[in-house]
Image (spheres, helix red, strand yellow):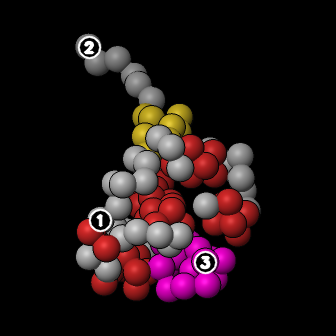
Amino acid sequence: MFKEFEIAAVFPGQASQEKGMGQDAYNHSEEAKRIFYIASTVAEHDLELFCRETETENMKGPLVQPALGAAILSDLAVRERKGLETALYKGHSVSEIIALAAAGGLPNLEDVFRIL
């Protein structure tokens, strides 16, 4: 007999970024587009374009953290829309802030991206 279980989301830290991160979510979800829009507005840079076109080895500097946050939160939004119920969020390094946001501890996305 199978035992019931809950799902935990574990988010990677900086240095896990790669070209194309968040693109699948962005291309298939209005919520993902909204998240990238908010992140881009706060960062004053098109983070969707940064994720889509910047080669992994060139993803450095102040845009990495908000871009990683937008990609992770966008992917999570798609999974939740499909019915994934997450019971626990954990992040490594900068993703601790993303985990806090995902858990509802930072409900204002503008604040999340200002911190990142």
Where residue 77 appears, as percent x and y from the top left, is: 49, 60
Q: Which residue is mark 3?
A: 43
Front: mark 3 or 2? 3
Q: Is residue 107 left or right of residue 10?
A: right
> What span is colored magenta in the figure?
31-47
Amino acid at pointer 3:
Ala
Q: Which residue is mark 2?
A: 1
Residue 26 sits above or below residue 88 on the image: below
Q: Which mark is residue 18?
A: 1
Q: Is residue 59 left or right of residue 92?
A: left
Determine if residue 98 is in view.
Answer: yes
Q: Which mark is residue 113?
A: none
| Residue at point 73%, 63% (across, down) | 111
Front: mark 1 or 2? 1
Amino acid at pointer 1:
Glu
Earlier sequence position, callout 1 versus callout 3: 1
Where residue 109 appears, as percent x and y from the top left, is: 67, 65
Earlier sequence position, callout 3 versus callout 2: 2
CA distance for labels 1 and 3: 18 Å
Image quadrant where one finds the N terminus: top left
